[in-house]
Amino acid sequence: IRKAKGNGGLKGSEYNVEVLKLLDRETAPQGYNLTLRAVDRGIPPRQTYMSIPVHLADLNDNAPVFDRMIYEVDVPETAPINSPIIRLKVSDADQGRNAQVFLEIVGGNEGGEFHINADTGMLYTAVCLDAESKAFYTLTVSAID
């Protein structure tokens, strides 16, 4: 704590707390407890303590992460349209709105054979698949927070 710049006498409201190193909510999710001690110049000196809880607001400083880099699944050729195939699992170390992740197919779906629920991560067939015309698909899915 240091005295704030300005004119006039010393008042408690003229002090600032400065952070000396970067604080990260993910490494201290319960926050911090700041203890202030005030001592007067009397004889004998008297003192008092005050505890101040410090809660950190979350920043969107973490990217979403898939639980696997590659998902492999077999889809029966007889699967009807809108058949669920697999749920892609994504996590984000942020909190609240900063942890909301939306999924999007960004590659390999030029014919629109598949669609994904952006909120749940469930991948579905969008058409009846035909192994004779195309037996293998490689999709690229993006997770956006």
Image: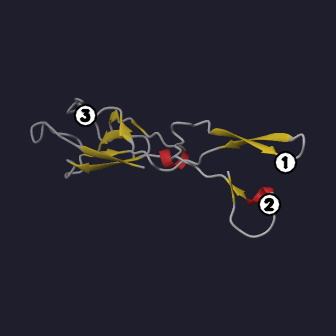
* Tag 2 and tag 3, C-beta contact below 8 Å: no
The amino acid on which the numbered mark 1 sits, given as a three-letter code, is Arg
Q: Nearer the viewer, mark 1 or mark 3?
A: 1
Residue located beneath label 3 in the image? 70
Earlier along the polypeptide chain: callout 2 or callout 3? 2
Q: x and y percent of residue 62 in the render?
A: 43, 45
Task: Write the residue at 31% across / 32% down.
Answer: 68
* Tag 2 and tag 1, C-beta contact below 8 Å: no
Element under label 1?
loop
The amino acid on which the numbered mark 3 sits, given as a three-letter code, is Ile
Element under label 2?
loop
Cα–Cα span, label 2 and label 1 = 13 Å
Q: x and y percent of residue 145 in the render?
A: 42, 49
Q: Residues within 10 Å of mark 3 (few under 14, many from 20)?
A: few
Q: Residues within 10 Å of mark 1 (few under 14, many from 20)?
A: few
Q: x and y percent of residue 58 in the render?
A: 54, 47
Residue located beneath label 2 in the image? 10
Residue located beneath label 1 in the image? 41
The amino acid on which the numbered mark 2 sits, given as a three-letter code, is Leu
